[in-house]
Each structure stands twice: as C-alpha cells, then as structure tokens.
Amino acid sequence: MSDEVSHCQWGGITCDDDGHVKQVKIRNNRLSGEFPSNHLSLLYKLEVLDLANNALRGTLAGTSVNPYVGAVVDASLFSNLRQLRHVDVSSNILSGEVDVLFAPALVHANFSNNKFTSINPFKRFKPSHNTLRECDVSHNSIKQSADTIWTNVPTNLERLVLSFNAIFGTLPSPLEKLESLQHLTMASNHLSGELPDLSASFPNIKDVDLSNQQGENGGFSGPIPVTLNWITNLPTLSILNLGGNRLSNEIPALLGNMQLKHLDLSDNAITGTIPAGLSKLAATLEFLDLSSNELSGDIPIELIMLEDVSLLLGGNRTR
C-alpha cells in the first residue's frame, strides 16, 4: 500500500469525485517564486483559484498577434480552463500587463495590490467579455490613458475598481453604456478634464467614486454636470464622491432631488451658496462633505436641522 499522499489531500486543494482539482485556495501561506502558470493551466476542471496574500512574482499570459496568420489570437495559458470562474491573486508581486479576461468563464477577478503596469485592452471575442461581473485592479501601477481602458468594457460588469493607480487623461464622453454596472471606483488616479454625463451610461449605478485625482494635470474641472436626466436615469445612485478635484461653479440644486446617502464634494473650487434644496435629501442622507471649497453666504437652516447626518462645511466662507 502506497504511503504517497494524494494531491486531493493537500492543504487548500479540493477535488471532485474523479480526483480532478476543482479549487485551489492557498492564501496567506507565504508562497514565493514565479506564478505557477504552467502547472495551473493543466487543471482543466478548476473553478476557484485563490492565491491572495502571498509573494508570487511574474506575469499573467494574455493575447498576442500570431506572426504567421497576422491575427490577434487568445494566447493565454488559461484559455482551456473553461470552468474557472473565481480568481483572487491580490496582494502578491505580479507585474507587467494584466489580462483581466485571461480565462474564458471568469465571473469574479481580483488583481489588486500587485505591481501591474498596464491592462490588456478588452477583446470582444473573448468569452469572458460576456461573463465577467466583478473586476478589481486597484492599488497597482497602471499607467495608461483612460480612453484606452474605457474601450470595449465588458458589458455585464457589476463592479469595476481601478483606484490607486496612475491612469491619466480624460474619461470618454459619453462613457460606454453598462446597464449592469452598480459600483465604479477610480479614486486616486491622474484623471482630468470635465466630468462626463453619467446618466447616459450607468442606469443602475449605486456608487461612484472619482475622488482625489492627482498629478500635474490631475483633477476633474468645470461644473458638475447634473441635469434632470440624473434624477430620472440614476434612481439607484446613493454614493457620489467627487472630492479632491478642481470642480468649479455652483452646487447643482438638483442633487437634492436624488436618493443620495453619501455626497462628498470636498476639496474643490466650488463657489456660490449652499442650495437649501439639498435638505430634500433628509430621508436618505447620512453624510455630506462640502468642506474646503469657496462657498459663501448663510448655511441653510434646513441643512443644520437635519438629524443623524454628518455635515462637514469647514474651509469655506459660509456663516
């Protein structure tokens, strides 16, 4: 009788009844060395890959141009892993270009807290372009233009996190229509230019964070483009964070007709008075930060009287 331990008995490994590996969950294990792409690509029954919080290095395979046929082909080593739906390789030392569509059935993908420097352009021909629901590439070193990233975005995305990178330039206007998108975070990048009209692109969005844009030309400028379309087309928007930019003009009174719980317009160059209409948010509002702007005049008594609301107004000329 063999004393050899089956791979299905290894810590973090789950197999099916036939001995095929279905799950690899080895997070927080101080794994080091090159990312084991060649070995993982042979696990064609793999459904879950979780190697987060280790010290793995190297790159993830993506797409390339076949010099013999002159066409773009899916060159990913993981293209045969047709059951792989959940991937978490966050908090490692992976670098180079990340292909967030690197496996054909991906639903949840977390590439955050690595050293990736670019995102492979989205390809519509990849099957995971239709399956991907959540993607986190935050806390990397992505240095690409926003319009490059916002081309052919997977249409069924529900959550997209691109914060704490070096993404630069202006957002396309209009942005691609993503009817399933609920959470968008691009905070702490180097974005600039005017804000696009979100109401034309994200009818089911719940929270948007475009705060703290840095760099030489960093910071959205111009007015906050709130129109009646925001009220009718963004009925689920509850968190809007535009703090730490260069926005100007007055606060749109129409914001008071929305269903916001959290509104942050701090550290901008917004002028004028605080519209009393913001008090219409009384039924939903929990946090309002208008600090460090160029606001003046009297603070509406209706706002002061709101209960259970964190209200931050310092650094203005209000009274």
Image (cartoon, helix red, strand yellow):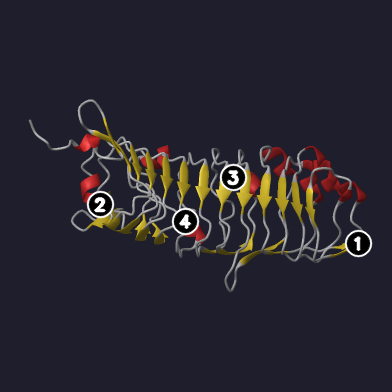
The secondary structure type at the circle numbered 2 is loop
- Marks 4/1: CA distance? 44 Å
Query: Which quarter of the rendered picture does the C terminus lie within?
Result: bottom right
Q: Nearer the viewer, mark 4 or mark 2?
A: 2
Whether pointer 2 and pointer 3 mark residues with C-beta atoms closer than 8 Å, the reply is no
Disc on res. 48: none
**Residue at label 1?**
319
Q: Nearer the viewer, mark 2 or mark 3?
A: 2
- In the picture, measured across the screen, residue 220 lies left or right of residue 33, that is right
Position above or below: 116 against 175: below
The secondary structure type at the circle numbered 3 is loop
Pick the residue in front: 208 or 169: 208
Q: Nearer the viewer, mark 4 or mark 1?
A: 1
Q: The disc labelled 1 sits on which kind of residue?
A: Arg
- The answer to which quarter of the image holds residue 120 is bottom left
The secondary structure type at the circle numbered 1 is loop
Whether pointer 3 and pointer 4 mark residues with C-beta atoms closer than 8 Å, the reply is no
Q: The disc labelled 2 sits on which kind of residue?
A: Pro
**Residue at label 3?**
201
Q: Earlier in the sequence, mark 4 or mark 1?
A: 4
